[in-house]
């Protein structure tokens, strides 16, 4: 089975770099499954789990937005933050989720605060989802 | 003479204490400098990659337009200044702030024509004292700032440009050359320009939903990343400047201690000689 290099890079460090068989991401327009020799593509990503399949194992990474660049033999995901499932602090994510939910109920009047709380909630849910998939 | 000796001794002691502190600060700065440099290097792949993709889009699709790429007539200017929270870093803050003040005096007649984003307590205090218009500030930034730490100021600097609050954004920071040299640098961040310079159209991509749509997401990110790398560079410069400053402080203290020790020994010897002379004179008088 042919493989390609998958890299996930954040401003602080390189989070992930492995040879893989397939990547599943959630783009702005919907889910994408990318396999080797895909046509070159650039698309922004939603806040969602990214699944990377290699040798029968699948790695799940919580990717916070960003975008994906696909080339024939290489895929690079650039995001402001990204965590492997085992690096996620579940308690912190739970706390963040509750905080965001509280803010959503309070901040309905202020549009910016509302957007912000919504995004925070998405990030927290994403992290929790990833840990669930991982288990 | 005896009193003079005690005074010198006390002075030596004081200099030794100072030297101990500056020496410790030098070593702390040295280790922080290494970490800051590592962080600056680790941030590079992300910024490089973003630039690559953005310039690819700019080269591959002719006539893409985006508010962040357009030069508007300049009515108002914003400056983002990166300083440190703490002093004892040689000319680190002073040089940067002096250069900025000169530039501002040259370019603007009144405080209505510019606004300042400031990172670091030293810079904030400086602008407050002079009643210059600060619109946003961050103080107490960690030595190894994460992207999240500066995200808010970077995002608002970029979005205020997009909504037309000002028409250009300059970033002021100390560019890190090596531990001895940091150059106060001015970079024009927005509007973004010069993408076409360094690419030979690697491959043509498909864009989803469209080239403009992708650009819309990427350009603000790119600008924020540039700010982040400037902050990391500034941090490395700060530690470098502090290390050098403390290194020379330690050297100066050693020099002073040496010359004081010499004076002390001379005084001690003179006192002994005098004592002997007095004893001999006393003995001679008796016989």
Image (cartoon, coloured by chain):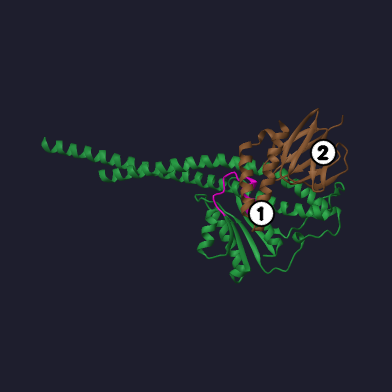
Chain colours: A brown, B green
The image shows residue B106, relative to residue B58, as above or below, that is below
Residue B161 pos. (x, y %): 69, 61
Q: Residue at x 43, y 44 (%)?
A: B253
Q: Position of residue B207 (x, y in %)?
A: 84, 50
Q: Helix or strand or loop: what does disc 1 sit on?
A: helix
The secondary element bearing badge 2 is classed as strand
Host chain of mark 1: A
Neighbours of disc 1 within 10 Å: few (<14), some (14-19), many (20+): some
Tell me the distance, in whole angstroms, between the alpha carbons under discs 1 and 2: 37 Å
Q: Is residue A117 magenta?
A: no
Residue B150 lies in magenta, yes or no?
Answer: yes
Residue A114, numbered label: 1
Identify the mark at residue A74; answer none if there is no mark.
2
Residue at (60% x, 65% y) in the render = B104
Picture coordinates of residue B97, whole percent (x, y): 56, 59
Q: Camera-side residue: B14 or B194? A: B194
Q: Earlier in the sequence, mark 1 or mark 2?
A: 2
Q: Chain of mark 2?
A: A
Magenta residues, start to end: B138-152
């Amino acid at each position: 089975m042919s493989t390609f290099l998958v890299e996930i890079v954040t401003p602080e460090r390189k989070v992930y770099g492995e040879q893989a068989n397939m990547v599943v991401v959630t783009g702005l327009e919907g889910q994408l499954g990318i396999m080797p020799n895909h046509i070159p593509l650039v698309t922004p990503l939603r806040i969602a789990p990214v699944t990377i399949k290699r040798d029968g194992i699948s790695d799940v990474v919580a990717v916070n937005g960003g975008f994906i660049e696909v080339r024939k033999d290489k895929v690079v995901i650039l995001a402001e933050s990204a965590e492997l499932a085992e690096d996620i602090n579940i308690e912190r994510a739970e706390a963040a989720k509750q905080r965001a939910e509280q803010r959503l109920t309070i901040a309905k009047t202020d549009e910016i605060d509302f957007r912000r709380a919504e995004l925070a909630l998405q990030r927290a849910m994403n992290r929790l989802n990833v840990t669930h998939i991982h288990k | 003479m005896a009193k003079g000796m005690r005074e010198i001794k006390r002075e030596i002691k004081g200099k030794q204490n100072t030297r101990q502190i500056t020496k410790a600060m030098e070593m702390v700065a040295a280790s922080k400098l290494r970490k800051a440099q590592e962080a600056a290097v680790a941030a590079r792949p992300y910024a490089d990659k973003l630039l690559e993709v953005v310039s690819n889009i700019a080269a591959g699709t002719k006539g893409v337009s985006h508010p962040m790429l357009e030069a508007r007539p300049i009515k108002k200017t914003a400056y983002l200044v990166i300083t440190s929270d703490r002093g004892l870093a040689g000319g680190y803050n002073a040089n940067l702030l002096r250069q900025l003040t000169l530039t501002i005096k040259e370019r603007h007649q009144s405080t209505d024509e510019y606004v300042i984003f400031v990172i670091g307590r030293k810079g904030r205090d400086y602008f407050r004292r002079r009643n210059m218009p600060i619109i946003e500030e961050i103080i107490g930034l960690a030595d190894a700032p994460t992207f999240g730490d500066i995200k808010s100021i970077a995002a608002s600097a970029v979005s205020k440009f997009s909504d037309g609050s000002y028409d250009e954004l300059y970033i002021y920071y100390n560019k890190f050359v090596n531990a001895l040299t940091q150059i106060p640098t001015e970079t024009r961040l927005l509007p973004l320009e010069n993408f076409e310079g360094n690419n030979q159209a690697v491959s043509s991509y498909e864009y989803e939903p469209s080239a403009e749509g992708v650009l819309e997401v990427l350009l603000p990110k790119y600008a924020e990343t540039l700010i982040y790398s400037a902050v990391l560079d500034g941090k490395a410069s700060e530690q470098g400047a502090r290390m050098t400053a403390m290194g020379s402080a330690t050297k100066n203290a050693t020099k002073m201690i040496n010359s004081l020790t010499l004076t002390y020994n001379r005084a001690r010897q003179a006192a002994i000689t005098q004592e002997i002379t007095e004893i001999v004179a006393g003995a001679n008088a008796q016989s």
